[in-house]
Image: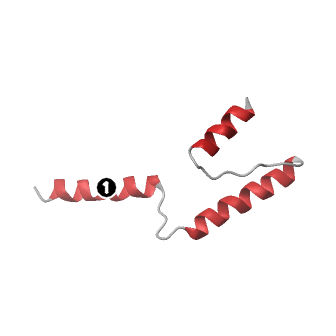
Amino acid sequence: MFTAFENTLKKYKKNYILLKGDKETRLKNATEAIDKIIAAKDNLHSFSDSLQVINMLKNKNLSNT
């Protein structure tokens, strides 16, 4: 099953890492990989932050009518 998933990632040229080792090592490596992705992004906003902004704008528009 793993091979099918890995082949699909390769087919669509998606980046991935293999997490090997004990639980602590896998967690450490996963956290480091995620931190690198986040550090490389400019103006990174979470989805929930976007929803809060939309909700604030919606409420502001309702109060102006």
Residue 15 vs residue 48: left or right? right
> Going 24% across and 54% down the picture, which residue do you hit?
58
Indicate the quadrant where residue 25 lies. Answer: bottom right
Which SS class for mark 1? helix
In which quadrant is the C terminus drawn? Answer: bottom left
- Residue closest to the eye, 2 or 19: 2
Residue 48 image offset from top left, x and y in percent: 45, 53
> Going 56% across and 44% down the picture, which residue do you hit?
12
Q: Quick one: which residue is furthest to the right in this view?
A: 22
In which quadrant is the N terminus drawn? Answer: top right
> Going 89% across and 48% down the picture, which residue do you hit?
22
Q: Quick one: which residue is furthest to the left in this view?
A: 65
Residue 30 vs residue 37: left or right? right
Q: Quick one: which residue is furthest to the top in this view?
A: 1
Residue 54 image offset from top left, x and y in percent: 31, 55
Say how the picture is coloured.
secondary structure
Residue 24 vs residue 32: left or right? right
Residue 13 image offset from top left, x and y in percent: 58, 49
Residue 20 image offset from top left, x and y in percent: 84, 48
Residue 20 vs residue 43: left or right? right
Return the residue at label 1. Answer: 54
Q: How many marks?
A: 1
Amino acid on which the number 1 mark rests in the picture: Ile
- Residue closest to the eye, 19 or 11: 11
- Residue closest to the eye, 1 or 12: 12
Mark 1, residues whose alpha carbon is within 10 Å: few (<14), some, or many (≥20)?
Answer: few
Q: From the viewer's perspective, is residue 42 above or below residue 52? A: below
